Image: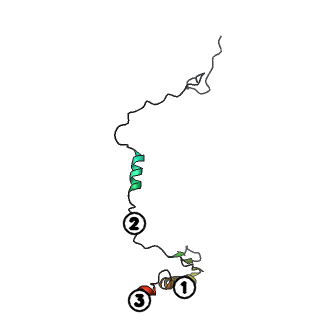
Amino acid sequence: MNPRRTSHLEGQPEPPDQPHPANPAPLRPVVGEPTGAAHKGVEAALRPDPQVGDGRYPVAWLTISAPYGATPSASSVCLCGRERRAFGKRRVIALIADHADHRDHCPLRAPREEGRAA
């Protein structure tokens, strides 16, 4: 009797004894303009940015956190370097008023004097 090799996985074909090289795909003729995602990506990259701003940008941020049943807190941060934090209801309300006052007097937002004289 000849010993027969059995596969460990049922229903799987026997592996070949020798490796075989991969067959290259047939070449297609290249005619016309390129299509596909790469072409569309380049086209989109050359378009002007549709999201043109109006020249405004954020200068100051007020963040308030008041989870239910916990102590409220707030922070006020400005690009001019001003940073304030408050904890507790009374202090948070005072910081909100202070933040609104700082918006009116911030050196980054206040109109310059030389512009008024001209």
Q: Which residue carries the number 1 mark?
A: 94
Q: Which residue carries the number 2 mark?
A: 52
Image spot of residue 47 (x, y percent): 38, 57
Report how far apart the C-alphas of labels 3 and 2 lie in the structure.
31 Å
Residue at image point 61% right, 24% down = 7
Give the structural element (helix, strand or loop) at label 2.
loop
Model colouring? rainbow
Image spot of residue 46 (x, y percent): 40, 55
Q: How many marks?
A: 3
Left or right: 103 as drawn, with respect to 53: right
Report how far apart the C-alphas of labels 3 and 1 lie in the structure.
36 Å
User: Which of the 4 image quarters holds residue 11?
Assistant: top right
Pick whichever of labels 3 and 1 is earlier in the sequence: 1
Residue at image point 39% right, 71% down = 54
Report how far apart the C-alphas of labels 1 and 2 lie in the structure.
37 Å
Q: Which mark is residue 117?
A: 3
Image spot of residue 58 (x, y percent): 47, 74
